[in-house]
Image (cartoon, rainbow, N blue to C red):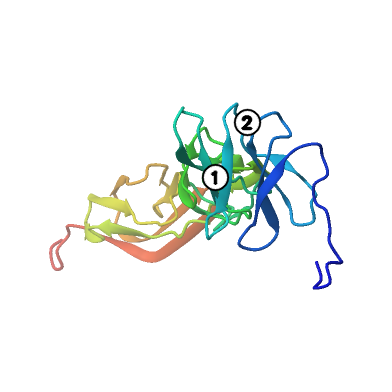
Amino acid sequence: MKADGTGKTQLTSDLANDNSPMFSPDGSKIVYVSDKAGSKDIWVMNADGKNKVQLTSNSASDSFPVWSPDGKKIAFWSDREGNNGIYILTLKTENPPVAAFFASQTSGNPPLKVSFTDQSTGTPISWKWSFGDGNVSTLQNTVHVYNKEGKYTVSLTVKNEAGTNTKTIKNYITVKTVYLKPITAFSASPNSGKVPLTVRFTDKSIGSPTSWKWSFGDGKTSTAQNPEHQYLQEGKYKVTLTVTNAAGSSTITKTNYITVTTNTRPGIF
């Protein structure tokens, strides 16, 4: 009110004894004592007198409420246990949290390692992640590995003293093997010698090929990964290898790669 006694605003007007008012540290609320419910209990209201909420409900007398410096708790006196004692109640936050999160990556080959970061507002005190593959986590920020191909729906449930909230993103993570075409390479041992020459061919291709086709230059072929082949006539032979995976095929040809000679020595007829 003003110095002349005017400008007063009555905040409570019920048929009860309301007393011991005290502002919260930020000035937005007033805690007070009222017997409007039949006994002396602790109540709180907005600084404008709206939104009156009963904080304690007991047949005893609860009185002399005092805010904590951070405004999160209220200490008060009570004889509810038969003797005078000091009690503390923790105030609920006004609003439940709002869940939000993001993933470090949302697609890739298995095993796909994903870091999930909580971006929720409203000061959550607990978290529960569901990764869509049957696994969960209660960490605020967590890492999960997806081992199988598929599309995964991810949800985060956050909680504070005012309630819970859940954010769900359908098919958020896509795990799929992306194949690259193979790169063909091979070696032979030996790559020269006399008839009959047995050669061991070794596939050195990269890109995880799943099928092989060899052409040895003498009309013979093989589909083994690492075949052996015997050359029965002298000559120079080109060797071709084609490898294939889910992404496609790749071929390499080595001309005059195998040299086969006869046992005939010069000057002998």
CA gap, disc 2 and disc 1:
15 Å
Identify the residue position indicated by label 2 in the image. Answer: 57
Q: Secondary structure at mark 2?
A: loop
Residue at the image position 26 percent from the left and 60 percent from the top:
191
Quadrant of the rendering where the N terminus is positioned = bottom right
Residue at the image position 30 percent from the left and 47 percent from the top:
229
- The image position of residue 175, as x and y in percent, is 56, 46
Q: Is residue 71 left or right of residue 220?
A: right
- The image position of residue 228, as x and y in percent, is 29, 45
- The image position of residue 74, as x and y in percent, is 55, 48
Q: What kind of residue is marked 1?
A: Thr
- Tell me, yes or no, if residue 193 can be seen here: yes
Residue at the image position 77 percent from the left and 46 percent from the top:
51
Q: What kind of residue is marked 2?
A: Ser
Instruction: State the residue in front, 267 or 159.
Output: 159
Whether residue 206 is situated above or below residue 126 in the rendered picture? below
Q: Is residue 153 left or right of residue 182?
A: right
Whether residue 128 is situated above or below residue 123 in the rendered picture? above
- Tell me, yes or no, if residue 175 can be seen here: no
**Count of numbered circles in the view:** 2
Furthest residue toward right: 6
Identify the residue position indicated by label 1 in the image. Answer: 90
Camera-side mark, 2 or 1: 2
